[in-house]
Amino acid sequence: MSGAGAALTGGIIAAGLGSRLRADGYAVPKPLVPVDGLPLIDAVIRNFLAAGVHSLRIIFNEQEQDCVDRVREHFGGAIALDIDVKTTASSLESFERVVGGSDGRVLVSTVDAWCRPADFARFAAAACVRPLDATVLAVTPLVADENPLRVDVAGDGRVTALGGDAGAFVTAGLYLVPPRDRRGAPPAGLERLRHYLAWLWHSGAPVYGEVIEAVVDVDRAEDVALAESLALTGRSGGGA
């Protein structure tokens, strides 16, 4: 990744309860739901390693000790781990806990944002070229979310619209966050990460979008099937 990974730490938001996947018959915690034979948490850590990131903070909820044990067992020797076990009230609280301990830029992924490692690495490399004070969102034309956050992006990469019913892209659960002292303090009362992103953009902060053609938000059994079909396409030479 042209050395960009050395300047980054990584963060994974994995504190959600995964209630929709459980309703679809999955008995394991969401981070352990397999896609193409690989648990979601393994796939996301694999992505960070592909992007050259070797320091990672992960937040799990308090019912996911088995996820903590798996990550330590399988990746403790491959990447520096800082694991936070906390059942949070919202995605925004989880996000703040993941990025709050770093003074540099943080590359963040939700645990359910499934994509190919090469695509993740390309996003990270492209995002690192953006200004140091910019927040960079991965956006995708693949709408695999029942409640997507829609985005429009100008030719120079700047986000020109965020939220509402229109937009050529949707957010993909991957973010490059600027150093802590360059992010504005959000107003009290924001409940979700999408509300923070909307506030950030409306406040005039620099927000960019980098396009990944295929990212699946794995919330339901049908999303697992879609991600597995994309994995198969990649192996057969139809994608990177």
Image (tube, rainbow, N blue to C red):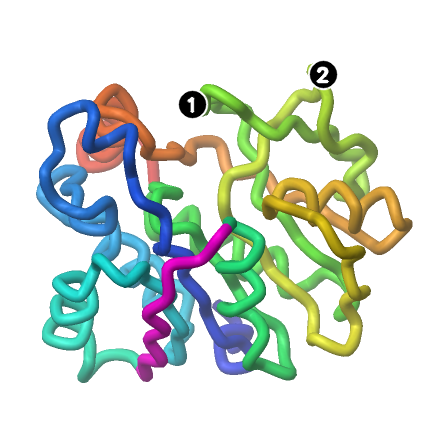
Residue 7 at x, y percent in the picture: 56, 80
In the rendered structure, the answer to whether residue 10 lies left or right of residue 44 reads: right
Q: CA distance from mark 1 to mark 2?
A: 16 Å
* Residue 39 screen position, x and y as percent: 17, 49
Q: Residue at x 10, y 38 (%)?
A: 27
Q: Amino acid at mark 1?
A: Ala
Q: Residue at x 71, y 57 (%)?
A: 135
Is 87 part of what is drawn in magenta? Answer: yes
Q: Considering the numbered disc 1 on the image, is that residue within a helix, a strand or a loop?
A: loop
Is residue 148 covered in magenta?
A: no
Q: Is residue 223 left or right of residue 92?
A: left
Disc 1 or 2, which lies upstream in sequence? 1
Q: Nearer the viewer, residue 85 or 13?
A: 85
Mark 2 highlights which residue? 166
Residue sitting at the far right: 204
What stretch of residues is rendered in magenta?
A: 80-89
In the shown orientation, is residue 29 left or right of residue 85?
left
Q: Which residue is mark 1?
A: 144
Q: Main secondary structure of the magenta part?
A: strand
